[in-house]
Image: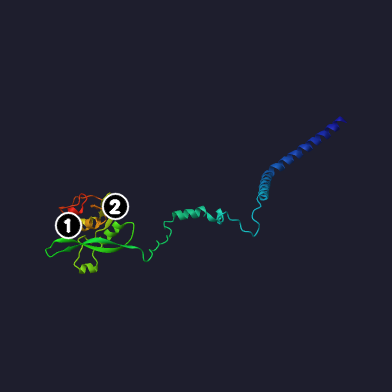
Amino acid sequence: MATSRKKKTGGWLLFWLAFFIGLALLFAINLERIKTTLNETRVLERLVRGAAEDPGVPEGAEPEAPEGGAAVPDPEISAPPLETADRILDDPTPPAQDPPPEQPAGGKTVERPVYLIRVDSSGAILGARVKRTLPASDSPLQDVLAALIAGPSAEEKKQGLISLIPGNVKLLSTIVRGNTAYINLSEDFLFNTNGVEGYIGQRRQIVLTATEFTNIKDVQILIDGKRLDYLGESIWIGSPIDRTML
């Protein structure tokens, strides 16, 4: 009788042991699926909670614009994708720029004197003061010197006026410090086919024209940004030149 009872007890133990082993195997096999289901459940709960806290925009309604009237841009729309931005940065072609605004017709003008050259019957080189009508600007010295270097007009040539400044000279820059104008010219200013008279005349034209401005007393001529001593072999330009030195 006792032996029969022990057999029944051992059979139940084996049954329950096999049952728990089977459950463990099923749990192990379905572990990944269980994790995925739990994660999806958490995400769904967060979405539901967020929707409850933020009612959003009713269907068919436009989002409200902030004060000032400008709508808040959608960052997903306004910001280009990263790869698009990279292509823009790598593109060597600069973006098209708007053309500068045209100057209005009938702008203000001003009359400025420039000095050309007249050669008298004895061969003496004289300065001839003529007036040019130029646009009013914030750089009047540069404007008037550019007009001087451009040479005489057709009508002035008929009157026997000439310029002894070499035709290929370029005005590089102008600056006024104190009462001295620093006029920077290209190296073409060093070469005059008219000899000494040509050098005297071109220096005279620059100095007389610049010192027409009441705040300019003398002129320092520079060549490609450098101070040189002479034009040719003997025409001094190594220091500021005023009218009394011409």
Q: What kind of element bears circle 1?
A: helix
Q: Which quarter of the rendered picture does the N terminus lie within?
A: top right
Percent from the top left, x then y, of residue 144? 28, 59
Q: Residue at x 49, y 54 (%)?
A: 85
Say few, some or many: other residues with alpha carbon within 10 Å of mark 1 (under 14 / 14 to 19 / 20 or more).
Answer: many
Q: What kind of element bears circle 2?
A: strand
Q: Can residue 242 be seen here?
A: yes
The residue that mark 2 highlights is: 175
What amino acid is found at the position of numbered circle 2 in the picture? Answer: Ile
Q: Residue at x 23, y 63 (%)?
A: 130
- Mark 2 or 1, nearer chain start: 2
- Spot the residue most to the top: 2
Comparing 56 with 25, the one in front is: 56
Is 62 positioned to the left or the right of 17 in the image?
left
- Spot the residue most to the right: 1
- Spot the residue most to the front: 214
Comparing 168 with 118, the one in front is: 118
Q: Can residue 224 be seen here?
A: no
The residue that mark 1 highlights is: 200
The answer to whether the residue labelled 2 contacts the one labelled 1, judged by CB atoms less than 8 Å apart, is no
Percent from the top left, x then y, of residue 62? 61, 58
